[in-house]
Amino acid sequence: MTPAARRYVGLAVFMTPAALWLLLLIVLPHVDMFLLSIRSKAAQGTLGLANYTRFFAEPIYWNTFARTATYSVLATLLTLLMAFPVAYFIAKVAPGRAKSILFLLCLLPFWVSELVRTYGWMILLRESGVLSGFLVWTGLAAKPVEMLYNDVAIMIGLIYTSMLFMVVPLVTVLDSLDDSLIEAAYDLGGTAPSILREIVIPHAMPGIAAGCIVVFMLTLGNYLTPTLLGGKESLWFTEQIYNQFIVRFNWEQGAAFGFLLLILSSAIVWVGLKVTGQTLASSIQSR
Amino acid sequence: MTAPIDLEARDVVRSFGGFRAVQGVSFEIPKGSFFSILGPSGCGKTTLLRMIAGFLEPDAGEILIGGRSMAGIPPNRRPANLIFQHLALFPMMSVAENIGYGLRRRGVPRAEIQRRVDRVLERIGLPGTGDKQIDQLSGGQKQRIAIARCLVLEPTVLLLDEPLGALDLKLREQMKVELKLLQADIGTTFVYITHDQSEALVMSDRVAVMSQGRFEQVDTPQGLYYRPRTAFVAGFVGESNRWQAQVMAASGDEARVRTTDGLELMARTSAPVVVGETVDLFVRPEGITLARDAAEIGALANRLAGTVESVLFDGANSRVLVKELQTRGEVTATLPQTGRFADLTPGQTVQLGWGTGGGLCFGRGR
């Protein structure tokens, strides 16, 4: 065997698990889903885009999607706003040992399953919950307050779930920012806001983009948190997909919705990258 | 010669925890001079520089720039700018944006910034590079852009934190000359810190040698080399053969000493010594005369014979390592430029000699 051929064999051996994973768990199901989505449930055997046009024809569907997308963008931005100071503190301010402890504290909630974490929020927010009880006890509220099953509750849950996925890429990218750049800017007359705007954020941009993509995708595709914290009226798009598959047993429609979610969310990410002048490659490398 | 004082330190002290990094340093730097602070790593020079720049506040003492006390004034409002060891150019900005950063922060109008950036680029010999990105520049160009970024703000004092350290040897030699010429041309006061004695000696008007948080000696480069006042300066600046010795006889500024390995030598003293005192004796390799015949050096006060151990040929800076016959101790001597000793090989016997003034000894106290 020539060295080149040997190298290809070696590459093939190492790539096989990843290739199998991609093919069997990502490509095949999606091909099948796509085939399913262009079939009609009513008229068996006919192919067409009827399942897709229905999404645009029925206001409830695309309204739900628009609401989900808007809230996901909002949740992403709020997560960014909250995670940035945390990440900055961990990467630049905290001394050596405190750094890893703080990082661990961010990680800690993720040792518990998402379901349990969400129930934790329900215990806090429900009418007979901790927060409500506290308000009554202090006399700030006359009777117990229901704080679950509204959009704010959904937002809290989503941001809480997403925090780590924003903090990690931000810490990585801020760690790679040379402290002397900040000092140099300060020495040349920069003030804290201007240094943040002109030095820190431009440097952190790939990490910001990476974190935002991950958080946006996770939020948009989240089913558990909106359903549990938002209740029946949460109107999250994943719920529509679930309904089609499980409640109505309309797999064809559900598959079409699944594809629409994939396409539309990809489009939103693409627009976001274009607007901020980032590339997907730079945000994936994120250093 | 009464140039106004641009930078002054009065008994500046700074500690970290229990460690006293800078202990009572005072100096005055007249306007337009090139001042270097030379010392080994950990001697406190970086701490001192960061206090001048404003990143650290002194625990005690005072720093004045242009006659104004800098106590409590943050770095962004001090008339001193710092060139960082790794330059710290902003990679997210073009060359012109880098240089214009400080002016933008001062609210200078856009057209004026453009004009001043062009002018400073012209001055450092890089006209028309304003649109380049930082990673398109060579090491020497980056160096000059970093200087331009500070100079455009017309600081009273320009601080440089070993900016040549990261360059390769050839470029470093070239930048040394360039920096000196640039400083002479623009007339801004430079404060340069380094652990490289050659950088300090070549560029500076005056050099402060720093050790363990104190200034050992502040002098011209020539003064440091020819008239070191402490053993540390004698050992740190230039090369030296070094012996520990005891004073046998002393008269005026001359002494006869006996080294611990038994050589009796004549030397100059920097401060009066007494008989029996332990001293450090320094003899520069370039002060030693090399001869094949003892008669050639008969007039010199100190004469040793030895065998050549190895020849360290390095062009103009060639030396020979000689094993002294009597004590088997090693002595380094500089090879003369004439080529008379070009055929010197290990094992040959040579004569070494130097006058009383070639050796300098410093008392250690009794």
Image (cartoon, coloured by chain):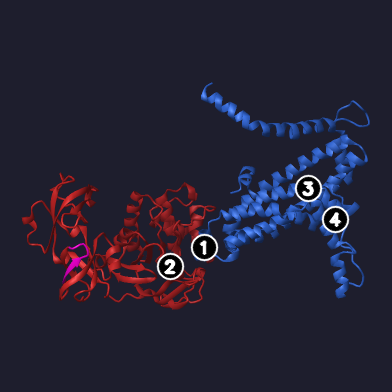
Chain colours: A blue, B red
Q: Tell me the amino acid under the disc marked 3.
A: Leu
Cα distance in 3D space between marks 2 and 3: 52 Å
> In this rendering, does residue A255 appear at all?
yes
Q: Which mark is residue A220?
A: 3
Q: Which mark is residue A229?
A: 4
Disc 3: host chain = A
Residue at image position (58%, 49%) is A287
Name the chief secondary structure element in magenta.
strand
Q: Tell me the amino acid under the disc marked 1.
A: Glu
Q: What element carries label 3?
A: helix
> In this rendering, does residue A202 appear at all?
no
* Residue assigned mark 2: B49
Cα distance in 3D space between marks 4 and 1: 45 Å
Q: Is mark 4 on a helix, strand or loop?
A: helix
Q: What element carries label 2?
A: helix
Closer-to-camera residue (A42/A180)? A180
**Residue A137 drawn at (x, y percent):** 87, 73
Q: Residue B218 carries which label?
A: none
| Cβ atoms under marks 2 and 3 closer than 8 Å | no
Cα distance in 3D space between marks 1 and 2: 13 Å
Q: Is mark 1 on a helix, strand or loop?
A: helix
Closer-to-camera residue (B199/A202)? B199
Q: Tell me the amino acid under the disc marked 2.
A: Leu
Cα distance in 3D space between marks 3 and 4: 15 Å
Q: Is residue A60 above or below residue B147?
A: above
- Residue stretch rendered in magenta on the structure: B255-262
* Residue assigned mark 1: A183
